[in-house]
Amino acid sequence: MNLYCKLSVANHILQSDYIKVSTENQQLKAERMNLSRDRDGLNWTLGVIFQLKNFPVDNYCPYEDANTKACKPCQVGWVLFQSSCYLFLHIKVPFGHLWRTWQGSRQHCKNNNADLVDIGSQEEQEFILNNTQAYYDEDHGYWIGLTDIAEDGQWLWVDGRNQNLTDGFWKIQPVWGRDCALTNPNNEPLANWNAAPCGQRNRWICESKALIWSG
Ligand SMILES: [Ca+2]
């Protein structure tokens, strides 16, 4: 074999090696993306668990069959929307209805590793509309995690975020003596937040971070 032939064979081998390596490289890149997505998801889950005092395993990870438990994004009975889980309280008790004050509602959410709902977007407002209904009379609705009880006129969400009266989905300008907000299904869908006396008893909505979220 002359030199040209030898070089040409070597070139062929190198070319096929190159194709093999670059295919493997592509596969590794794809695997790396999958792994980093899984890692982000697990970090999210860990972050949610670290915020809890106790992790209610049976509520989040019920038995799928006799031997296998599988974790779900939300506790049993809660509804998943984007990266959050929601509990809509329409509880009926034997002697009427279980409605609560704003504080009482908030305590119930906290007892369930959640807080009163924080409505941060129009999508979330619409999701909530789809899961609530008018009941009892025009003044009753569902407590949300918004109050100006600390300072009159300074409306804050439960995480401390400020809520302007010109943004959001207010129906009326809140008035003195009405320090807690509810979403009222009797009103216009995108203008249905009312300020109400915190001691009024209403249904309420809890929100917590989903246990599982892939971003
Ligand atoms: Ca929210």
Image (cartoon, rainbow, N blue to C red):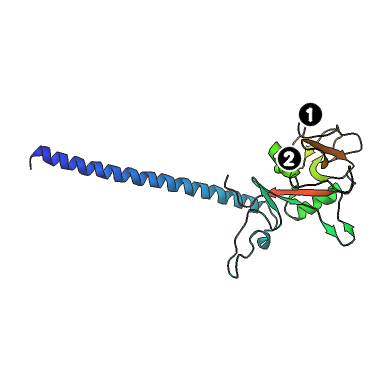
- In whole angstroms, how far apart are the C-alphas of marks 1 and 2? 16 Å
The x, y position of residue 89, in whole percent, is 79, 52
The x, y position of residue 209, in whole percent, is 67, 48
Q: Is residue 205 left or right of residue 210?
A: right
Does residue 46 sit above or below 126 in this rendering?
below
Residue at (68%, 56%) from the top-left corner? 75
Q: Secondary structure at mark 2?
A: helix
Residue at (69%, 54%) from the top-left corner? 52
Q: For mark 2, what is the residue?
A: 125
Q: Secondary structure at mark 1?
A: loop
- Which quadrant holds the C terminus? top right
Q: Quadrant of ligand 1?
A: top right
The x, y position of residue 12, in whole percent, is 20, 42
- Which quadrant would residue 58 be assigned to in this image? bottom right
The x, y position of residue 153, in whole percent, is 85, 32
Q: Amino acid at mark 1?
A: Thr
- Pick whichever, 130 or 205, lies toward us: 130
Q: Amino acid at mark 2?
A: Gln
Whether residue 19 can be seen here: yes
Sequence-wise, the earlier of marks 1 and 2 is: 2
Foreground label between 1 and 2: 2
Q: For mark 1, what is the residue?
A: 166
Mark 2 CB lies closer than 8 A to ligand 1: no
